[in-house]
Amino acid sequence: MKIAIGCDHGGFDIKTAIMEYFDNNGIEYIDFGTFDGETSVDYPVYAKKVCASVLAGECEKGILCCGTGIGMSIAANKHRGIRAAVLADEFSAEMTRRHNNSNVLCLGGRVIDSKKAVTLADIFVKTEFDGGRHQKRVDMLE
Ligand code: RB5
């Protein structure tokens, strides 16, 4: 599995922590930027890059980090076929995979710390979709 990952300046630190975790655990990813935490940039640009990679099948899932995760989730959900979830707790990270088959995780670097970001990314990457009755509901989204 390959993960597309991107951020703006507000999510740079947690994106860096998640990539370190991926490096140490053999999880492949493509980093779509931004590449420094100092320069103010526009989150929709990075949401578009990550979503395009997921929709093209280049990456199976995406992770987007900004200050709150909210801007990234709004931007990501404009892309047909993307099911982006912004969250800050373990239960939601598990359930959005199991029930919503979310393909993009949005996190806020001003909401959660790096340790929590890594924990949530790990759950998101490893949890499978339950399918069954949830498939019909996910199909209805399209
Ligand atoms: C940038 O200051 C901030 O607005 C952005 O990172 C994000 O929180 C938007 O939702």
Image (spheres, grey):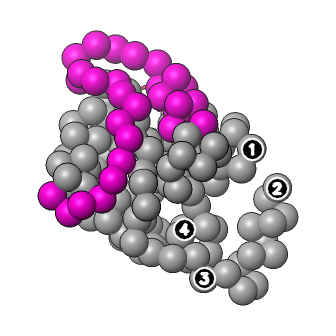
Q: Residues within 10 Å of mark 4 (few under 14, many from 20)?
A: many
Inspect the magenta stretch and tell me whether residue 26 lies in it: yes
Q: Say which residue appears at 45% left-offset and 75% top-offset.
A: 127
Quarter of the image where the C terminus is located: bottom right
Amino acid at pointer 4: Thr
Amino acid at pointer 2: Glu
Amino acid at pointer 1: Arg
Q: Which of marks 4 and 1 precedes in the sequence?
A: 1
Q: Are marks 4 and 3 in contact (CB under 8 Å)?
A: no
Q: Position of residue 49 (x, y in %)?
A: 53, 31
Q: Which residues are magenta?
A: 24-52
- Left or right, residue 28 beside residue 44: left
Q: Are marks 3 and 1 in contact (CB under 8 Å)?
A: no
Q: Determine which residue is flagged by label 3.
A: 130
- Does residue 40 sit above or below 6 in this rendering? above
Q: Which of marks 1 and 3 precedes in the sequence?
A: 1
Mark identifier at residue 80: 1
Q: Most extreme residue toward the top, as rendered?
A: 39
Q: Determine which residue is flagged by label 4.
A: 96
Q: Which of marks 3 and 4 precedes in the sequence?
A: 4
